[in-house]
Image (cartoon, helix red, strand yellow):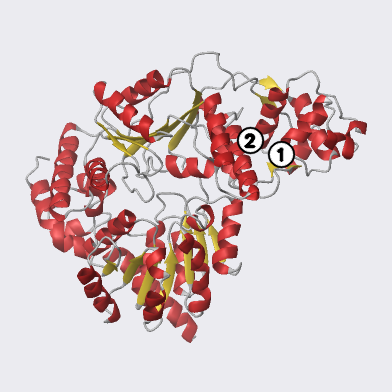
Amino acid sequence: MAAMRQAQELHRRKSRVLKEVFGFEAFRPGQEAVVDALLESRSILAVMPTGSGKSLCFQIPALVLGGLTVVVSPLLALMQDQISALRLAGVKAETINSSRDRAANVATWRRVAGGEVNLLYLSPERLMTARMLEALGRLPVTMIVVDEAHCISQWGPSFRPDYGALARLRDLFPRVPLAAFTATADEITRKDILDKLFAGTAEAFFHGFDRPNIRLAVALKRDWKRQLLSFVADHAGESGIVYCLSRKKTEATAELLVRNGVTALPYHAGMDQADRDANQDIFMTRDGVVMVATIAFGMGIDKPDVRYVLHTDLPGNLEAYYQELGRAGRDGLPAQALMLYGLDDIRMRRLFIEQSDAEDARKRRDHKRLDALIAYCEAPECRRLALLSYFGEHIDRCGNCDVCLEPIDVSDGTEEGRKALSAVQRTGQRFGAAHTVDVLRGADTEKIRKFKHDRLPTFGVGADLRKEEWHSILRQLVAGGFLRLDVQGYGGLSITGKGHGLLKGEESFRYRKDTIRRTGRKTRKQEPAAPAAALSDSDAALLEGLKDLRLSIARDRGVPAYVVFHDRTLQDMVRRRPKSLDAFAEVHGVGAAKLQKFAAPFVDLISGHPD
């Protein structure tokens, strides 16, 4: 009975915090189960798609439970934006980091030690110092949160060694629950996080990866500058991100867009920090700005109205691509992701892997991850199906990718698919694509002779196709869910349930022929995403006025505009037109603190606007 009463009280308190602090009536899908687990002091790994409200999942338990929650975050800019948003919501959040002078850090620590702080944001390097760990050990730490937890797996010991050192936290704070959050983790990365951070003992929450509002498209490079300008012209006046592989190309691409009348800014790690910060501030606070960037830009960027992400070059792998395209459409409205790729991209990515300082095992995994990305590019049916199946999620055709909307020319490859699957099966489902192709084409290699694979019935049955064609077929069998690729090991191929269906005649396989080539049909023009519901002239004018007011307040406070109010909150103001404080309190995203700080100017603006 006591346990039931306690559970009911926690439920009341979490609902009260959700409404009074953050201004939300209900949790989004997937949030409440994670919140409840943390309220029960269980250690968890939560994998949730970008824009699903991961931060709220640990911020609410932190406020309900009291004490001190320590949040480990990889980037100062990411910490600062979250802290700014929390403070405006009336939450006592702080950070101690190297960008602040010693006196400011000391003053902050005094507030932490005095019990005046709810959430303390630290980099892994700051947290894992002996002095900080000892000091935190004397405080009532309620929870430790690792944000962007995929960094534990993806950032090796030579880059951010303290990410690996976070594994010590479970021994240093044995009674404190650990929570890890990420939007980007394939099966191997999830297992890596569970093993390294939790020794395999955490409860895992997997809310899926699908972002159905983002239209996915891939195009072979023909004339990338012309393709870029055409795509951006289709999105005139909208905010977007253009990713480039090199710093030099980033600068040149921004200049190209500016020469063609687009408000575009560069962002890369070689720029002066002040210039990077200034460009990011402009992008975050103004409409219609295009950021041209390397991968140095993006982690934690929470600009809700990014309408498109365009890659002028092939990303490193599907995890990186998913993370980068996920910066589009965080407001839930239609957005687009276009990737351009070609032969030189693949060659360069292979070269990067081989020239890295990684161990051979890591290089093998990176090559196989690149294979999976190429398979996505060559997907013969649904692009989203190929993307999500890599992360272990399965859907039917999405109806919102280039392949679904403009079906490509595909051929019946059922016979070729069965030959390939038979070769995989007869060789023991443990060899990679290169050996499988050699078996199919009847090659005379040392490995084939060693394993006596020249005696198999499938030896040489595919001699009529070129090696490149068989590699493309195998990648498309992976993309279509007929074959599974062992990314962690040596790239071995194994047959899925769907693949066994193909062998039994219960499934068919269609594929696109010779997709990687230097010449071919012209890339079809990308159609712009469907617009949001049209506003009346009066509503559009009011929304514009609300955005101007929000931007003015944000600049006065030195924070991004979305930290004051998200676009969805402004849209709800337009819909409700609140003309009193009580009515304003009912607007989506308006908590008690923001009601007190910001209601008056917004109510005045709305009251003075003609209905």
Residue 407 as seen in the image, left or right of residue 509: left
Q: Residue furthest bottom?
A: 2
Position of 196 relative to 601 (above/below): below
* Circles 1 and 2: CB atoms closer than 8 Å: no
Position of 87 relative to 207 (above/below): below
Q: Residue at x 56, y 68 (%)?
A: 198
The spot of residue 17 in percent (x, y) is: 32, 68
For label 1, the crowd category at 10 Å Cα-Cα, with few meaning under 14, some 14 to 19 and many 20 or more, is many
Q: Nearer the viewer, residue 142 or 412?
A: 142
Residue 18 as seen in the image, left or right of residue 169: left
Give the amino acid at mark 2.
Answer: Ala
Q: Nearer the viewer, residue 475 or 215?
A: 475
Q: Nearer the viewer, residue 3 or 285?
A: 285
Tag 2, which secondary structure? Answer: helix
Q: Residue at x 48, y 75 (%)?
A: 41
The spot of residue 297 in percent (x, y) is: 36, 44
Distance CA(mark 1)–CA(mark 2): 8 Å
Give the amino acid at mark 1.
Answer: Leu
The spot of residue 553 in percent (x, y) is: 14, 51
Q: Which mark is residue 479?
A: 2
Q: Residue at x 9, y 40 (%)?
A: 610
Tag 1, which secondary structure? Answer: strand
Residue 312 as seen in the image, left or right of residue 573: right
Number of numbered discs on residues: 2
Q: Nearer the viewer, residue 165 or 90?
A: 165
- Residue carrying label 1: 483
For the question of whether residue 42 can be seen, the reply is no
The spot of residue 21 in percent (x, y) is: 27, 65
